[in-house]
Image (cartoon, rainbow, N blue to C red):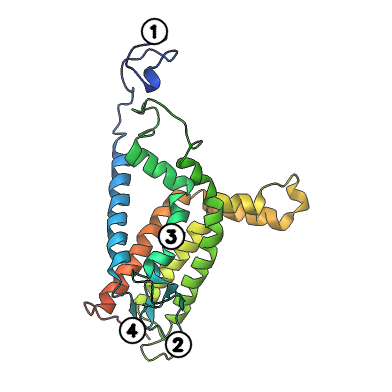
Amino acid sequence: MATGTTTGTTGKNGVLTSGRAAIAARHLRTDRWWVSPLVTALGLTAFVAYSTWRAFANADYYSEPYVSPFYSPCLGANCVDMPLGARWPLFGDWWGLSPALLVLIFPLGFRLTCYYYRKAYYRGFWQSPPACAVAEPHARYTGETRFPLIVQNIHRYFFYFAIPVAGILTYDVVLAFRDTHGQWGHAGLGTLILLANIVLIWAYTFSCHSCRHIVGGRLKHFSQHPVRYRLWGWVGKLNARHMQLAWASLISVAVADFYVFLVASGAFHDPRFF
């Protein structure tokens, strides 16, 4: 198939600009390449819609001993009482909005700048590009070299904030091994849901590309750093499942919040196993 090159086609852009291969078709793929970006866009849209509703609801996020991961740590003075929970009213009575807005910025920023999520919403929403070997419809491509996408480079700093947030959610899981009277040594369905959620959150956090670089980056000889080399190997194995962990932890945090919502609103009674 002879293609040649274009010679400055008027009104064309992207792969049809001057100097590129003169292929009239937008792509040569025959599979259903559009399914993946479509499903990704629908999944992310559903999560954004749900999390926005719950973040602004400012209600039904705590039921002893469970607290929603969307509201922990609770930093506003307008938080509900959480006996022994992560309730630190750093923001006084002047804060009238939902306390979830004070903490969600950190896990949201961590995921928004995540390498995998960038690929997901770049393809799903911006079609940049929509799929491999499919031309994007944009006239120019500057990557992440200009504002606002250059801000994506602060991903590592959000990783530093994600660690203590995950640590606090772990503390919430420990507190979930109590009954409604605060007695230890008990567990319910909510305990298992919060436990599964924090395991997936830690796995996703440690599978981060920034974590892998922090653990094993800037080393010239792994043989001289056996501990870091071993850690780098473990993180590398998680990193190979970064996409799956990104989706699994995204779903689990929504499920955990929804479960607490059901229990706190009285719509569902939490079964206790012991």
Q: Amino acid at mark 1?
A: Ala
* Pointer 2 or 1: first along the chain: 1
- Residue tagged 4: 272
Please tell me which residue is depicted at 45% across the width and 89% down the height of the picture: 184
Identify the secondary structure beneath mark 1: loop
Q: Quadrant of residue 70?
A: bottom left
Give percent across and percent down for residue 61: 33, 74
Q: Quadrant of residue 99?
A: bottom left
- Residue tagged 2: 185
Res. 113 visible in picture: yes
Against 9, is 137 above or below? below
Please tell me which residue is depicted at 28% across the width and 60% down the height of the picture: 50
Give percent across and percent down for residue 152: 49, 45
Identify the secondary structure beneath mark 4: loop
Q: Amino acid at mark 3?
A: Ile
Against 144, is 203 above or below? below
Q: Amino acid at mark 2?
A: Gly
- Residue tagged 3: 105
Res. 236 visible in picture: no
Labels 3, 2: front one: 3
- Residue tagged 1: 2
